Image: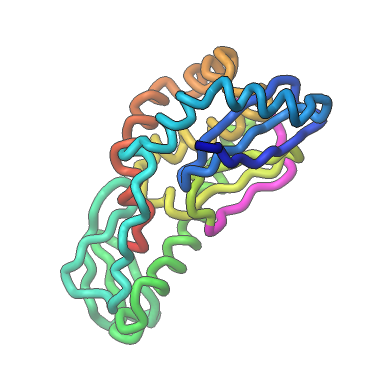
Amino acid sequence: MDLDYAIVRSPKRRKLTITVERDRRIVVHAPESISEARIREIVDSKRQWLFEKIRHEQKYNDEPEPPGKELVNGEAVLYLGRRYRIAIADTESGEIEFSRQFVVPPRIAASGSKAFANWMLVRAEQQILPRVKLHARQLGVSYRDAEVSEGRFRWGSCTPRSSLRFNWRLIKAPMFVIDYVIIHELAHLIEPNHTPRFWNIVRAQHPTAEKAKDWLREHGALLEQNL
């Protein structure tokens, strides 16, 4: 069985690495100098490992079916690691309001989960981006820009040009998990590859990194739901 993979080259990269994305795509990150023949040889040598990765049921669960219908009174929504109930009622602002529960005006509830996702995206920008600045300062690194986006299969990414991207669905996770994803991507500005040095940087900055990784493995599919 042939393995399909994409090659991403970078002049800054010194070593070749292979990753399997959450949608089961295989991506080879390679230095500019390495030939495609050599890349193919390395990928072939990793065939067994790659097949095990793409067949891993827990990590690569198909995306759950989205709720789709209008929001329901009493329905629970995951936010910052906890579930909060939805109350359908008018609000003073006419928009979604949050305290110990989500109060959603009827007109928004009738529009379905998309309006709620937009609310979450704005809160993700407000919560995540300041923490990117905080952790970058603590690590002593600088980045070109950072944004929260609609990315579907990665929690975060760091481009060769030092641009950081974070999935808005992270706002559903506990803050220690959000911090782990941020630190993980910032650590790539110091060490591009997942070497022992890279993981030492992450663990030194985030002592509960393993706990955060376990949380994402166990609950990642829940974050991918629209609500």
Residue name at image x 37 percent, y 31 percent: 212
Relative to 177, does residue 77 appear above or below in the rendering? below
Q: Residue furthest bottom?
A: 107
Residue name at image x 74 percent, y 27 percent: 37
- Residue 140 visible to an observer of this rendering: no
Query: What range is drawn magenta here?
Result: 139-150
Residue name at image x 53 percent, y 43 percent: 25
Q: Where is residue 178 drawn, in percent x and y?
A: 44, 40
From the viewer's perspective, is 69 left or right of 32? Answer: left
Relative to 73, does residue 201 appear above or below in the rendering? above
Q: Where is residue 138 drawn, in percent x and y?
A: 60, 27
Relative to 196, does residue 150 appear above or below in the rendering? below
- Residue 14 visible to an observer of this rendering: yes
Residue closest to the eye, 163 or 17? 17
**Picture quarter containing residue 142?**
top right
Residue name at image x 63 percent, y 29 percent: 188
Q: Where is residue 56 drawn, in percent x and y?
A: 36, 35
- Quadrant of the frame with the C terminus: bottom left
Residue closest to the eye, 168 or 139? 168
Residue closest to the eye, 46 or 102? 46
Q: Where is residue 69 drawn, in percent x and y?
A: 28, 77
**Picture quarter containing residue 27?**
top right
